[in-house]
Image: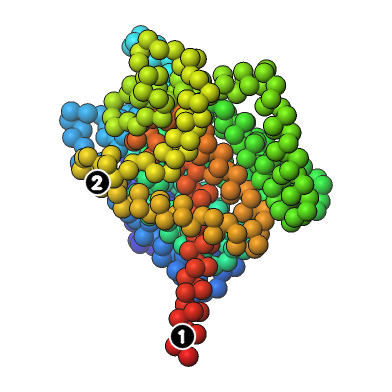
Amino acid sequence: MLIYAGVGILIGIVYTLSPLTVWCAIAIPLMIWFCGRGLEPAERRRVRIVLVIAIAVRVLTVAGLFLATDHAHVPFGSFFGDEEYFLRRSMWLRNVGLGIPIHSADLIYAFDDYSETSQLYILGFLQALVGFAPYGTHLIGITLYLATVLLLFRLVRPAFGAAPALLGLMLMLALPSLFAWSISTLKEPLFFSLTASSLACAVAAAREPRWRRKISLMLVALAGALVLQTLRRAGFVLEAASIVAGIVLAWMIVRPRLMIAAVVISVLAASAVLARPRVQVRVADALVQAAVYHRGHIWTPGRTYHLLDDRLYAELVDTRTMRSDEAARFVGRAVFSYVTVPLPSQIDSTAALAFLPEQIVWYVLVALAPIGLVFAMRRDPLVASMLLTHAVIAALLIAFTSGNIGTLVRHRGFALPYLIWISAVGACELLARGVATGRVHQT
């Protein structure tokens, strides 16, 4: 009885200090248990070891932030500059909601249009429930990210097999850029969670034979896409396009003749449509708008890279003067830079040098993706198509609008979680064939 009483008292003390810690401490073990259901004992043990290590490292990192922060001079510590801004705004919104007076300047910034996102209101609501929780919100980010990774793992495991699923899981939990995502209080963990949940619901709906359940799953996917719109501009359009394109691609990939006909018809139709002046004007306007966003990144602090011709970076030059040949070079450079930046010549600081190992992993993942896509399409066309369309559409959006290396690396994470699983299939297939060839030579 004394042991139970002591545990109860300890939980009460921890809950008083940080309620979100207790909530996450309950949710995370449940997710680990659920993820292991249906797996063979050896595989379940490997998966759980990977998860426990990943969670421990993340929690210790947040604890290290707490211990390293001088709370006599600052109210809380943060990993990224934007986190402090988000937490302060969410607290101002929380105080307004509870009727607590705040400074008039803080009131203006609380409802500022800059970086307006529903993430602020979610953080404010959480802190209205539990009080000021600058470190507990990091644990919420960890829990959301972990839940999303496990959701994709459970989706990929029956589709592609145990080895690619485990390799993808380890990469998702170990890559530094995604690690930084997972411990942040920024909107990336929630955005990733909603995107992956909508993807999983769309896959389940496509396979569900019962129409009522199919419609229910599609409505959940639609709801997730609508919430994405409140987090990031064009979130709904991107998610809806990814889902529709994934379903159409999966349907055509198992009908080769129909797919060939569709490709030919699409090329002819696109050529006819693009020949119309009105369409050409709209395409040019879209590229000009992307160039405007790109130039905005060029003029921000930090290391940048150029996609436009040099004359278009002059302050008094309007991007609407971009010629067709300049637009073509802009498109080519955007795609090339998305894959290659930062190049070795652009690594000129200790921070950039520290990122070099992940950049090498990124190059390997990109090289393995075409191989993995072939085998993934053979095993499960629907899941492979969904992962592919989510990765490609997210990549294209970032490729044409970015210009800051740090921002590109951060935003490349929108495509990376889906590319990883496809590349993992390619890596496992090459490894399996290499082992088989070695055995043949030995005999």
Residue at the spot of label 2: 353
Q: Residue at x 38, y 34 (%)?
A: 407
Is residue 183 in view from this perspective?
Answer: no
Would you say residue 50 is visible in this rendering? yes
Q: Position of residue 217 (x, y in %)?
A: 71, 44
Closer to the chain start, of discs 2 and 1, is 2
Asked if residue 106 is positioned above or below residue 57 in the image, the reply reads above
Q: Which residue is the site of mark 1?
A: 441
- What residue is rendered at 33% in x and 21% in y? 299
Identify residue type, mark 2.
Answer: Leu
User: Which amino acid lies under the numbered mark 1 shown in the image of this protein?
Assistant: His
Residue name at image x 78 percent, y 53 percent: 257
Category of crowding for the residue at label 2, using alpha-carbon neighbours closer than 10 angstroms: few (below 14), some (14–19), many (at least 20): few
Q: Please give the name of the residue rendered at 22% of the width and 28% of the height, measured from the top-left corner.
A: 74
Residue 109 percent location from the top left of the image? 38, 15
Please say if 416 is above or below 381.
above
Circle 1 packing at 10 Å, graded few (<14), some (14-19), many (20+), is few
User: Which of these two is toward me, 141 or 258?
Assistant: 258
- Residue 438: quarter of image: bottom left
Residue 187: x and y, percent?
45, 34
Report the front residue among 408 and 142.
Answer: 408
